[in-house]
Image (cartoon, coloured by chain):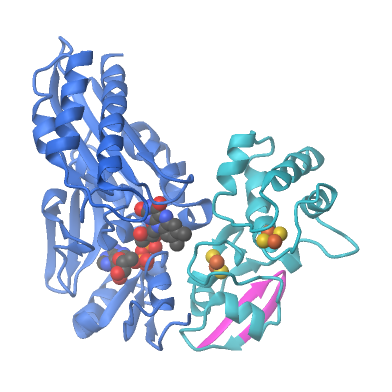
Chain colours: A blue, B cyan
Amino acid sequence: MKPCTFEYYKPSSMEEALDLMHQYGGEAKILAGGQSLVPAMNFRLATPGILIDINGLQDLSYIKEHRKHGVLIGAMARYSELEKSDVVAKKCPLLHETIPYIAHPQIRNRGTMGGSLVHADPAAELPAVMLALDASLRLRNKDGERVVAITDFFTGMFGTAMKEDEILTEVAIPHMPKRYGFAFDEVSRRHGDYAMVGVAVSLNVDRKGRCEKGKIVFFSVGDAPVFAEKASQLLDKQNVSEELLENIANVASSEDIEPGSDIHASADYRRHLAKVLTKKTLKRAFDKALA
Amino acid sequence: MKISLTVNGQKYERDVEPRMLLSDFLRHDLELTGTHVGCEHGVCGACTVLLNGEAVRACIIFAVQVDGEELTTVEGIGNVDNLHPIQEAFREKHALQCGFCTPGFLMTLVPFLKENPDPSEHEIREALSGNLCRCTGYQNIVDAVKLAAKSLT
Ligand SMILES: Cc1cc2nc3c(=O)[nH]c(=O)nc-3n(C[C@H](O)[C@H](O)[C@H](O)COP(=O)(O)OP(=O)(O)OC[C@H]3O[C@@H](n4cnc5c(N)ncnc54)[C@H](O)[C@@H]3O)c2cc1C
Ligand code: FES
Ligand code: FES
C-alpha cells in the first residue's frame, strides 16, 4: 500500500504550473486535495511519474461574488471553506446544503471543488450539484483558456472534456433567479459514505407559482451524473400538486435513469430510492420557491 | 527532498523521498508511533493528525507537502501523567478497548470540541463518521465526548 516513485513539483505561480503541464502533459498529474488521487496511488491504481502540487497557488482558493457572472469559486477552494463561506450560504444555498453530505470532516478539510469535478466520480455530490446549477468551468493551458459548460464536461466514468495539459482554475455559478427553490438529498448506508442514490433539484417559479425552469439531477445511478431531462421538462409551466410530484417522480425513476446493480444496492432499489427522493426534494424546492 | 516542519512544538528537518506518506514519516522518521495506520487509503481515520490545527488523514498526504507547516499528533495533546480532558473522558467512560482507533478519534475530537463546545448527540455522531472502531460499538465513545464537552467548558 505504498505509492510508486514520482517526481514532485510545487509551483508557486499559475504560469509555472502551466509550463510544467505543457512540458509533462500525460505523464503528470495535478495534486489538489489528494483525497482521491493519493488513495489511488497507494493502491497503485494510479502511477503518475510526476506530481504537480498546486497547493502553493494561494490565489486559487477564492470564493467571491461577481455582479455579472454569479458566484466564482477557485478550483482549490476546499469543501470546509465552502461549508463555512457566507457567500456560498447566501448566494448558492444548494451548494451550502450539499457540502455536509460529502465524505467526513477530515476529508472536507483537504478535498477541493476542482478535484471533485475533475475526478468525475459518478457517485460524487458536487458534479451533480454543479449540473443542477448550470455552472461553467474555466480551463487553462499554456496556450490560453476556454470556458466549458458543465453540460459538456462529463464524458462518462471518471471521464471529462479536459485536455492532458489543462488545469481547471475556476467554477462560475450563475446568480439565482427570483422565486428560487432548491433541495438536495441522498441515501447512504452511513453519513458521509458515497450515496446509493442522490438527487439535486434547482427551480424557480413565476408570479403565479408555475415552474419556469427546473432541473433534476441524479448521481450514483450511472457512469456520470444524470440530468433527468424528461422529468425536468414535465415541470415546465406547472403548479405544484401531489399528482405532478407523483408523475414526475415516476418518469424520473423509470425513464430518465438506467441504474445498475452492485454490492451497495440493486437496480430496482435504486429506482425506488430515486422515486422517493425526487418527490421529497421537488416538494421542498417548490415550498422554498413559493415561500 | 529537504523538509522542515514543526511537530508538537518541536522543529524537525529531514530529507524525504516524495512518495513518503506523512503517516510513515511520523512513525518511522520521527518515531512518533502514536499515529496509527489502519487502511492506508483514507477510510478508517486511525491516522488522523492536526495540520495547522485542522484534522486531516496523514496516510493520504505526502510528507513533502507539509514542508514549513505545523502538525500536532496524539503525543502532543497529553501524556500518561497529564491526560488531555478528552483522554480523561475516554478513560472514564471506557471508550476504548484495544485502543488502535483511539489516537484518530482523539485528534478528530480536539478541533471538533473547540469549534462545537456544546454538541448534540447527532453532531457528535456526524463528527465521528470518518473514524472506524471495531471494538466499542461507538456508544461509549459518544458518551465520552459528552463528558469531555462538559469538562472542557
Ligand atoms: C474516505 C473517503 C470518503 C469520501 N467520500 C466522498 C463522498 O461521499 N463524496 C464525494 O464526492 N467524494 C468523496 N471522497 C472523495 C473526495 O471528495 C475527494 O476530495 C475528491 O473527489 C477529489 O478532490 P481532491 O481535491 O482531493 O482531488 P485530488 O485527489 O487531488 O485529485 C483528483 C483528480 O483530479 C485531478 N485534479 C484535481 N484538481 C485539478 C485541477 N484544478 N485541474 C486539473 N486536474 C485536477 C487530479 O490530477 C486527479 O486526477 C471521499 C474520499 C475519501 C478518502
Ligand atoms: S490509515 Fe489513514 S485513514 Fe486509515
Ligand atoms: S478500541 Fe479497538 S478499534 Fe476502537
Q: Name the foreground residue: A250 vs B7.
A: A250
Q: Residue at x 15, y 70 (%)?
A: A163
Say which residue appears at 55% left-offset and 83% top-offset.
B3
Q: Above or below — where is A59 with respect to A275?
A: below
In the image, A131: left or right of A212? Answer: right
Q: Residue at x 26, y 42 (%)?
A: A268
User: Is B80 situated left or right of A276 in this image?
Assistant: right
Ligand 3 quadrant in view:
bottom right
Find out whether residue B96 is within the magenta segment.
Answer: no
**Residue A87 shows in this picture:** no
Q: Percent from the top left, x then y, of residue B108?
A: 63, 55
Question: How many numbered circles are shown?
Answer: 0
Taking the view exactly as shown, the residue that stands out farthest to the top is A208
Residue numbers of the magenta segment: B1-13
**Can you say whether A100 is above or below A261 in the image?**
above
Residue B98 location, quadrant: bottom right
Q: In the rendered view, does A187 fall on the left or right side of B99?
A: left
Q: Is residue B12 magenta?
A: yes
Q: Which of the 4 image quadrants contains residue A135?
A: top left
